[in-house]
């Protein structure tokens, strides 16, 4: 597996986090108890920031997560806070560094957890289940999770990860603590940024515990997508031509669905493509001629405004002659002819491919056939479309998004972009990029078509497929945020507003 590209902030999985700890302890001779003390200092600091006054209740489990809690309780008491310590695991069973922190605790001893013990708390620290947890919480932790979530006014700060969340994947099998702030130590974990775990984590704060990043032998495979991903976006220069800026074919459209390929085409233009050709049903061509000024059209054979398989020949020929990238599927519909058209074009077009909407549905249960393509392909499903591709239920995809997107990438040999507030970009070799989200303006019809057009432009301009997909996801979300600011909120944003903000987004992303 190659390293993460510039612009992805590394996230460590559970095994990598442990390996990083071992390296610091064994190779750099940093005592484990010193690492835990620094973690507790950061945790206590976040508690003080989240709730400067009032009673603190620290709920400690077993293992190192409980050790972090005991240490933070001592530090908060030392700072003059009233702190009650409750336990969900017998403190006498602790060992190693966690036992040291238990023994250092002064003042009132820890008491067994009860809901009554939470009364009057201004802030609750969840230090029950740590990074190694997966599955379903058992009692008394399950009851403690429910009691903490039932509190009306207390601020909740989680240590490492909200109890009940799988730190590696974001899966939540049963209940999980709903935190306002999560303190994660040394590096964030994927599960804090992937739904449903992301929804439980609140604000994620990475606490530096003194483990160096330079020289660390751990090689992350997962990262948060940031602005520097646009450093690989090729800018136009004085010698650029429309041909050098890349050609995008957009194949789609049907009666009643002319907006989708139009949005994809305009997004490709605004994202920097030199020229775009919309391959559309011939009987609807006049509509596209009116809707699209800067985009060329190629009328194809159709039946009642729907694509038919015979039209695939021209799309394949244009792709062969002009290269670039092909966006296949926006507004194509689900007629038998359109689905056959999509399957044939996807199989035979010898250019980089973006497969979206009903282009994806044409391949439901047929993921493996895409693995035989000679050129890269990027699939852009939402959860329902990915479920159909994998022949599973949508609920299963939403419960384990990382697992399913990686499975789809492996089986298809394609990069898969699983859309959502936590959009995941997975490649067959295992690397994953995660969007920070936070762009509710995108929750409107047509924005998926905009993403496909951006991605088509980036591929046509020669960006490496994984970087192109990550950069397109970032650009799409940022343009949505900009549109929401311009329109005083996300609720009135429509897809064309996002298209309009693409040049401003790309200009702001210019890194000199």
Image: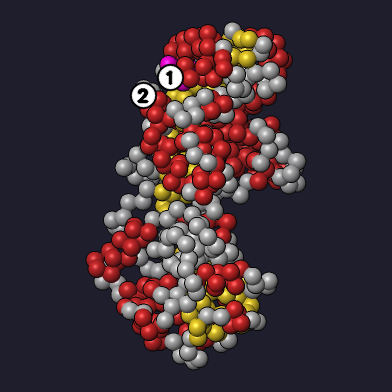
Tell me, yes or no, whether the two marked residues, 2 and 1, touch with CB atoms within 8 Å: yes
Q: Position of residue 497 (x, y in %)?
A: 69, 35
Near mark 2 (Cα within 10 A), the count class, few <14, some 14-19 or many ≥20, is few
Residue 275 visible in the displayed image = no
Residue furthest out toward the bottom: 107
Q: Residue at x 71, y 36 (%)?
A: 494
Q: Which residues are magenta?
A: 345-349
The main secondary structure of the magenta stretch is: helix
Q: Position of residue 42 (x, y in %)?
A: 48, 72
Q: Position of residue 185 (x, y in %)?
A: 43, 65
Earlier residue among tags 2 and 1: 1
Relative to 29, residue 92 above or below: below
Q: Position of residue 471 (x, y in %)?
A: 50, 38
Residue 187 visible in the displayed image = yes
Residue 58 within the segment the image draws in magenta: no
Residue at the disc numbered 1: 347
Q: Residue at x 67, y 11 (%)?
A: 304
Q: Residue at x 49, y 39 (%)?
A: 392
Residue at the disc numbered 2: 372
Quadrant of the image occupied by residue 52: bottom right
């Amino acid at each position: 597996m190659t390293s993460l590209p510039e612009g992805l902030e590394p996230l460590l999985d559970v095994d990598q986090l442990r390996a990083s700890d071992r390296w610091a302890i064994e190779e750099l001779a940093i005592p484990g108890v010193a690492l835990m003390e620094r973690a507790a200092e950061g945790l206590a600091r976040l508690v003080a920031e989240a709730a400067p006054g009032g009673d603190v209740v620290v709920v400690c489990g077993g293992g190192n997560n409980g050790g972090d809690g005991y240490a933070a309780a001592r530090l908060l008491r030392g700072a003059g806070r009233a702190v009650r310590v409750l336990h969900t695991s017998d403190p006498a069973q602790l060992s190693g560094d966690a036992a040291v922190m238990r023994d250092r605790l002064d003042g009132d001893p820890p008491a067994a957890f009860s809901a009554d013990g939470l009364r009057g708390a201004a802030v609750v620290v969840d230090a029950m289940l740590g990074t190694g947890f997966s599955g379903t919480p058992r009692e008394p932790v399950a009851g403690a999770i429910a009691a903490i979530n039932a509190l009306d006014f207390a601020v909740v700060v989680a240590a490492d990860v909200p109890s009940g969340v799988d730190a590696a994947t974001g899966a939540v099998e049963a209940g999980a603590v709903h935190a306002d702030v999560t303190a994660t130590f040394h590096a964030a974990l994927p599960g804090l940024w992937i739904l449903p775990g992301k929804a439980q984590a609140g604000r994620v704060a990475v606490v530096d515990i003194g483990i160096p990043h330079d020289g660390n032998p751990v090689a992350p495979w997962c990262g948060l997508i940031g602005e520097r991903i646009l450093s690989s976006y090729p800018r136009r220069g004085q010698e650029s031509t429309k041909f050098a800026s890349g050609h995008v074919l957009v194949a789609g459209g049907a009666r009643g669905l002319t907006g989708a390929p139009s949005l994809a085409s305009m997004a490709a233009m605004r994202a920097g493509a030199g020229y775009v050709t919309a391959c559309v049903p011939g009987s609807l061509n006049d509509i596209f001629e009116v809707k699209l000024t800067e985009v060329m059209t190629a009328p194809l054979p159709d039946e009642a405004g729907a694509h038919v398989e015979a039209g695939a020949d021209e799309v394949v020929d244009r792709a062969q002659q002009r290269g670039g990238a092909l966006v296949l599927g926006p507004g194509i519909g689900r007629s038998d002819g359109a689905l056959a058209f999509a399957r044939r074009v996807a199989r035979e077009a010898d250019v980089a491919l973006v497969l979206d909407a009903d282009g994806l549905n044409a391949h439901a249960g047929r993921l493996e056939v895409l693995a035989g393509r000679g050129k890269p392909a990027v699939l852009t499903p939402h959860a329902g479309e990915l479920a159909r591709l994998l022949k599973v239920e949508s609920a299963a995809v939403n419960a384990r998004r990382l697992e399913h997107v990686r499975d789809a990438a492996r089986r298809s040999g394609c990069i898969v972009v699983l859309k959502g507030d936590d959009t995941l970009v997975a490649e067959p070799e295992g690397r994953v990029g995660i969007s920070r989200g936070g762009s509710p303006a995108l929750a409107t019809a047509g924005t998926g078509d905009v993403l496909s057009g951006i991605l088509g432009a980036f591929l046509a301009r020669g960006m490496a497929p994984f970087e192109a997909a990550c950069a397109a996801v970032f650009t799409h979300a940022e343009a949505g945020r900009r549109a929401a600011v311009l329109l005083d909120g996300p609720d009135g944003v429509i897809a064309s507003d996002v298209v309009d903000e693409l040049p401003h987004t790309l200009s702001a992303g210019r890194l000199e």
